[in-house]
Image: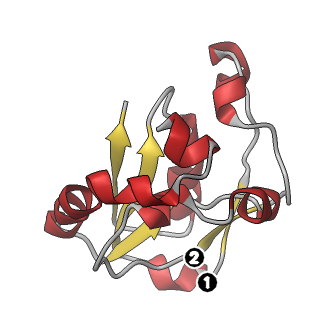
Amino acid sequence: MQRYKFNGDYRLRMVFQREFSKVVNEQKTDLIVPIPVTSTTMQTRGFNQVIGLLREVSYQPILRTKASSKVAQSSKTKEERLTTKQPFILESPEKVINKRILLVDDVYTTGRTLYHAAVLFKQAGCKEIGSVSLAR
């Protein structure tokens, strides 16, 4: 994961891509939403590591980050992660009303990232929300 996510070895996505995508596609859901990266991360890394893990998955990129850059969750302590403020904005909230949403992330550590995303979807009126992460 270090080589893939932080060192930018995009080819490593293929190690998990097929099986991870199969698990994602097997979920009973209306919308699949990957966790986004900041624009700074996208410029630096060149890819969103979550989207890179998805192959033949129809996803909706309706979640975006508020800030163009942020301190990486991986560099924070558990306490710092748990006090992080809402980093996301939900675009087109009308698309999620009464829908089953599946959030997709690469690594689940404290659950704070998924918690923040889930709050926005619940506020917008989604019917159900679940998540799938590659690693914990």
Above or below 92: residue 2: above
* Badge 1 amino acid: Ser
Q: Quadrant of residue 72?
A: top right
Name the front one of labels 2 and 1.
Answer: 2
- Which quadrant of the view contains residue 107? top left
Q: Which residue is mark 1?
A: 92
Nearer to the camera, 65 or 30: 65
Vertical side of 6 occupied by 82: above or below: above
Q: Secondary structure at mark 1?
A: loop
Q: Position of residue 31 (x, y in %)?
A: 36, 76
For marks 2 and 1, the one nearer the N-term is: 2
Numbered label tally: 2
Residue drawn at the location 34% of the way across and 82% of the way down: 58
Numbered badge on residue 115:
none
> Crowding near pointer 2: few (<14 within 10 Å), some, many (20+)?
some
- Give the image location of residue 67, x and y in percent: 85, 57
Q: Which residue is mark 2?
A: 62
- Visible residue check, residue 115: no
Side of 128 relative to 37 (left or right): left
Q: Three-letter amino acid code at disc 2?
A: Ile
Q: Residues under labels 2 and 1: Cα distance?
A: 7 Å
List x then y, in percent, for residue 11: 44, 59
